[in-house]
Amino acid sequence: MKLKRSRFSILNKESREIDYTKGIFKRTIQAKIESYKDPED
C-alpha cells in the first residue's frame, strides 16, 4: 500500500511537470504566432 501511494505521487508530480512544460510551450508558440501576424517592420 505504501509503495503504491509513493508511486502515485511520483506519477502525479511528473504529470504536473508535463502540464507546466506544455503551458510554457503553448505560450511560446502563441507569442511566435502573434509576432508573425503583426510583423514590426
Image: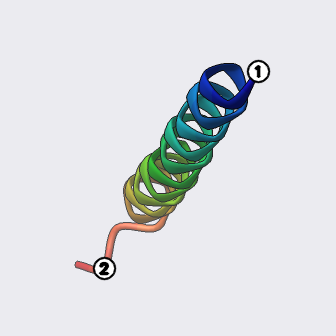
Residue 7 left/right relative to 12: left
Question: Does 28 sit above or below residue 11?
Answer: below
Identify the residue shown where x is 44% and y is 49%.
21
Picture colour scheme: rainbow
Label 1: few (<14), some (14–19) or many (≥20) C-alpha neighbours in 10 Å: few
With respect to residue 2, does 20 lie above or below? below
Residue 11 numbered mark, or none: none
From the viewer's side, name the closer residue of 12 and 26: 12
Looking at numbered disc 2 in the image, what kind of residue is underneath it?
Glu
Q: Residue at x 69, y 31 (%)?
A: 2
Which residue in the structure is indicated by mark 2?
40
View extreme (front): residue: 1
Say which element carries label 1: loop
Give residue 37's position: percent from left, percent from top: 50, 55
Distance Cα–Cα, label 2 vs label 1? 59 Å
Callout 2: SS: loop
Total numbered badges shown on the rendered structure: 2
**Which residue corresponds to the image point at 72% horizontal and 31% vertical from the top-left?**
5
> Dot 2, crowdedness within 10 Å: few (<14), some or many (≥20)?
few
Residue 11, picture quadrant = top right
- Depth check, front residue: 9 or 23: 9
In the image, what residue type sits under mark 1? Met
Q: Position of residue 13 (x, y in %)?
A: 56, 46
Residue to which mark 1 is pinned: 1
Name the residue rendered at 76%, 21% in the picture: 1
